Amino acid sequence: MALKSILVVGGGVSGLTAAVEASEAGSEVYLVEEKSYLGGRVTQLNQYFPKLCPPNCGLEINFKRIKQNPRIKFFTLSEIEKIEGEEGDFTVTVKSNPRFVNQNCTACGKCAEVCPAQRPNDFNYGLDKTGAIYKAHEFAFPMKYLIDDKACLGAECGKCVAACEYGAIELDMPAKSFNLNVGSIIWATGWNPYDATRVDYYGYGKHQNVITNVILERLASSNGPTGGKIVRPSDGKEVESIAFVQCAGSRDENNLPYCSGVCCMASLKQATYIKSQNPNAKVYMFYIDVRAMGKHEDFYTKIQNDITMIKGKVGEITEDSLTKELIVQVENQSTGEIMKEKVDMVVLATGMVPATAESKVPVAITYDEDGFIASDSQQPGIYGTGCVKKPLDVASSVKDATAAALKAIQSTVRR
């Protein structure tokens, strides 16, 4: 009996967990990630709930496990082009997109110091900018620079080439495709935030001080665009009042019909960010009902005493054109009154959309009506895990990925 290799697609917390667990059980693992770094959306968080600890500690442990494990080979800036074959014998074509920076890079940063071109920083959701040659974020793994070829001025500039004393810049680096032969595949491509502009009555994209829950994570992060200080995007003013609007597009037949399960806890966690920076800030949370199951109920009970909880779905958000303050209109379900609360900033708790809603697995598998990979995908040897199966928090994603690793190992056994 021999074990064949396992392919893990997606380098977020689910993919990382599946890769290290399968490899430490004896399997050869290939890990493919489309971004320039591993860690996924967890790297963009400020803190986990309910312990309120930073995510990079846990990620660093997994990165160390990868660095020390010769059975894992990972490919960033890469995507799956084609999958052929069957359980136990898949041939997968991988396209590796150019970084334009080779393995000589020491991340010294001299190239970025001389780069004259700029680009929106997607890691911070476009809230600030980087040079065309940049490091994805402070804790990026691998710790290598890369070039955004859409922003780079190319060979006519060449300032980064001259500044790099290690010969790490290759402006003509091509894309490459190669094949992998594997016995099973774990699909862990994660999730995307629901597009809040589609909920037009909340004014996201029109009112500067209406932001989303993922953006607030970056504002609260020490390596974020404001150095961790939560301020209004319109004028940099300290937030003295804020409204968290739950189910922003979720549980809505015109948008996301399902509940993502984690948004209530995320907003309660973010309320602690506001209170820690300004204990006197007024914090409102407008909700349909609060999903804080099991062990999370104690966290909910603790936080609700520090903020104003109002049961009611927000109907509209308007802006005072002079002050840029926001007026949140909602019917209070407990009293029946129509409330109009004026606040400095609004945070929309948008839901989780599986990456497979737009970017399908390049082989016939089964999805549910919302684009999640069905638990019974009817494709032996290919296993979805994490938030491509259903909305999950980090801890639940880790458990699910461990189970997927076991299934993948079983598929690689040749008798």
Image: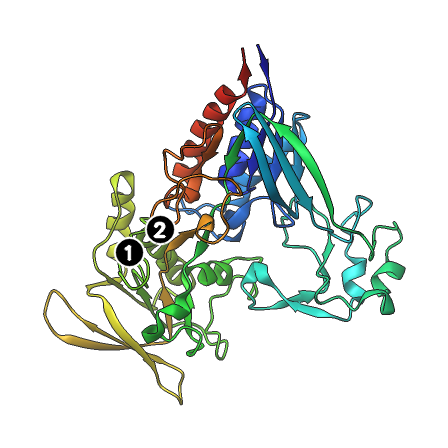
Mark 1, other Cα within 10 Å: few <14 / some 14–19 / many ≥20: few
Image point 68% across, 26% down: which residue? 70
Coloring applied to the structure: rainbow
In contact (CB < 8 Å): disc 2 and disc 1: yes
Q: Which mark is residue 257?
A: 1
Q: Judge left or right: residue 380 versus residue 342.
A: right
**Residue 298 vertical placement versus 350 (above, below):** above
For the question of whether residue 61 can be seen, the reply is no
Q: Judge left or right: residue 173 versus residue 296.
A: right
For the question of whether residue 139 can be seen, the reply is yes
Q: In the rendered image, which residue does mark 2 sit on?
A: 370
Q: How many marks?
A: 2
Q: Name the quadrant of the C terminus.
A: top right
Q: Amino acid at mark 2?
A: Asp
Q: Secondary structure at mark 1?
A: loop
**Residue 271 vertical placement versus 198 (above, below):** above
